[in-house]
Image (spheres, rainbow, N blue to C red):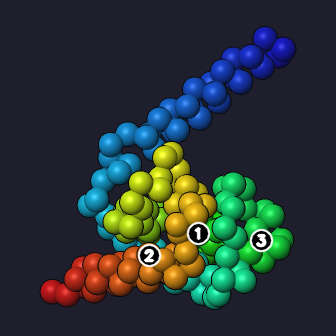
Amino acid sequence: MKLLLPFAFMACWQIANAQAGKDSLPQAESRDLVFDSLDLKIIQRADSILTDTSRWHKNDDRVCNDDITNGKYSLFCALFKASVDLTGVYQHRRPGMQQVRFVLEKYENGRVKEHRLMDWNNHPDTGFDEVKKVLRESILLVKTQIGKAKSP
C-alpha cells in the first residue's frame, strides 16, 4: 500500500498539470464564446455585488475569502463569489468570465502584466466607474449573443 502512495500522488500531479496546461492553450483564449443564462446571471450578480466604491476592494490578491468576509470585493472576487453563489463552483474559463476579461482588454492601456482581472483592478489608474463599465458592457454583449442564439 505504501508503494502505491507515490504513484497516486504522481498521477494526481500529472492530471493537475495537464488541466492547468489546458487553460493556457490558445483555445482558452478563443473569442468564439457561447453563453448560457448562467453566464449572464454571474456577470449581473457581480455587478450587483459591486454596488458602490465602499464595496470595491482595490488591492486584489486573488484570494477571495477575506473579500467575502469583509464585504469588499475586487473585480475578480465579485465574479468568483457570483459564480459560486449561482453554480456552486468557480470555473476560471467559463464563457462569461472570459467575456469580462476580453472587454477589460479594451481598457487596459498597459495596466496588465500577468493576471488581467487582478492587475487591472489593482492599477492606480483603474477607477470604480471603469470597473462598472466593463461589467455593464460585458452584460450587454452576453445578452446580445444569447438573444441572437434564440432568434430563428
Asked if marks 1 and 2 touch (Cβ < 8 Å), the reply is yes
**The residue tagged with tag 2: helix, strand or loop?**
helix
Mark 1 burial class by Cα count in 10 Å: few <14, some 14-19, many 20+ = many
Amino acid tagged 2: Val
- Quarter-of-image position of residue 35: bottom left
Q: Position of residue 114 (x, y in %)?
A: 51, 45
Looking at marks 1 and 2 on the same chain, the residue that comes earlier in the sequence is marked by: 1
Residue at (67, 76) in percent of width and height: 56
Mark 2 burial class by Cα count in 10 Å: few <14, some 14-19, many 20+ = many
Which mark is on residue 68? 3
Q: CA distance from mark 3 to mark 2?
A: 21 Å
Looking at marks 3 and 2 on the same chain, the residue that comes earlier in the sequence is marked by: 3
Residue beneath label 2, please? 134
Q: Position of residue 102 (x, y in %)?
A: 37, 63
Nearer to us in this view, 96 or 136: 136
Q: Is residue 50 visible?
A: yes
In this picture, residue 117 sits left or right of residue 64:
left
Amino acid tagged 1: Leu
Residue at (78, 11) in percent of width and height: 3
Residue beneath label 1, please? 75
Which mark is on residue 84? none
Q: Position of residue 152 (x, y in %)?
A: 15, 86
Residue at (69, 54) in percent of width and height: 61
